[in-house]
Amino acid sequence: MVDNPRVGVLGGGQLGRMLIEAANRLNIQVNVLDAAASPAKQISAHDGHIEGSFKDAAAVKKLAQISDVVTVEIEHVDTNMLEEVASEVIVEPSWKTLRIIKDKYAQKHHLKEHGVAVADSIDLEGKGPDGLKEVGTQYGYPFMLKSKTEAYDGRGNFVVKSEESVDAAIEALGNRPLYAERWADFRLELAVMVVKTKDGVLTFPTVETVHEDSICKLTYAPPRDVSEATAQRAQDLAKKAISAFEGKGVFGVEMFLLKDDSLLVNEIAPRPHNSGHYTIEACPISQYDAHLRAILDLPISQASLRLREPSIMLNILGGKTPDSHIQVKNKALESPNASVHLYGKGDARPGRKMGHITITAPTLAAAEREMQPLIDFVDEQNG
Ligand code: ATP
Ligand code: MG
Ligand code: MG
């Protein structure tokens, strides 16, 4: 590896922005491929950025030419071009991993083949309403209809509640490549950030994630009402899941904890992840530090991935007004242990991730007491 490596990132959203915050502290130049004033570019002034789309082959090639290592902050990228440039530049994680993960059905299939428990699923490509009704007969209702590709924040999911809602499901997602998943009647959701290095696989602690309308709202570290043994099992499962993929970097592993205490992997992200934001304040090194170190072969100790203090992260989602996130930020600034992050996305749109707040405290109960007024405020804003 060259002495002062330049990192190229496909995507310049909030994850790229927080990656740059970490890179800046190590004097690492990050070249971002995205639109001109994207959140990541706003905090990084140099002439190595590329303007364009991370789905555009020519733009990806350009980025590769001016970078020593290429990575991603989003998986919906042109993996064909990444495959092509991989002979000239280091691509982490591997384009093969990105190609599998960007298709959620292929990802499920891959995990299953490697002995990782996932929800049952059925391919629906080329099948119409009758295909969905057959799933209803086989799985019962509700079941989850999912787009294989381009899915995020629940945009790509539809809960099929009964045979009567099949038409609405087709109406909502019918023009996308689809598959169906058996309903996971979970007690709660867990997530683990996994770090894959040249030497092995490490994990951050297990967190509990709370989703509302399929969008992550809160994370709790440690999880509430989950035994240490279960948290350890979640870390082990996450490790096993990520061991099934090639390449280095951080990966987010989302899991369901079912009522019988068994765990299923919901999905994997081959990059920093919303469920790992808490690591910025709560762990010795953050998921962003860890990602950079992993792809650049810099040292990472398992001890630096530990939880220093219990923490809760609350997403600031766009509410009813374009300035709703500003109001939440102002309220959070009054909270003594709150770290406030805004992403520089301009006006809020309902449900859009505009920022987040992390509170750490000596106990989770103390963090909960301090976070509750902010949760109430956010609920009022979004009401
Ligand atoms: P992300 O923003 O995390 O990429 P996504 O759009 O890819 O989200 P999923 O992770 O597939 O969506 O699903 C979002 C949420 O919907 C899950 O966290 C869970 O709350 C719920 N969900 C997904 N699949 C199932 C299922 N099979 N059974 C029950 N609930 C589910
Ligand atoms: Mg997803
Ligand atoms: Mg998800």
Image: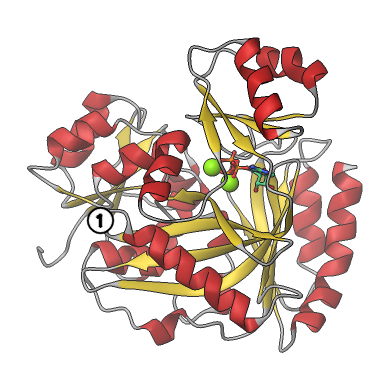
Measured as percent of width and height from the top left, residue 244 is found at 32, 56
Measured as percent of width and height from the top left, residue 31 is found at 29, 47
Q: Is residue 280 visible?
A: no
Q: In the image, is 333 to the left or to the right of 81?
A: right
Measured as percent of width and height from the top left, residue 90 is found at 16, 51
Residue at disc 1, secondary structure: loop
Q: Quadrant of residue 186?
A: bottom right
* Rendered-image quadrant of the N terminus: bottom left
Disc 1 target residue = 247
Q: Is residue 22 above or below residue 57?
A: below
Q: Front-most of 120 and 230?
A: 120
The answer as to whether callout 1 falls within 8 Å of ligand 2 is no
**Residue at screen point 73% across, 17% down:** 166
Q: Amino acid at mark 1?
A: Gly
Q: Front-most of 49 and 315?
A: 315
**Residue at screen point 57% across, 38% down:** 152
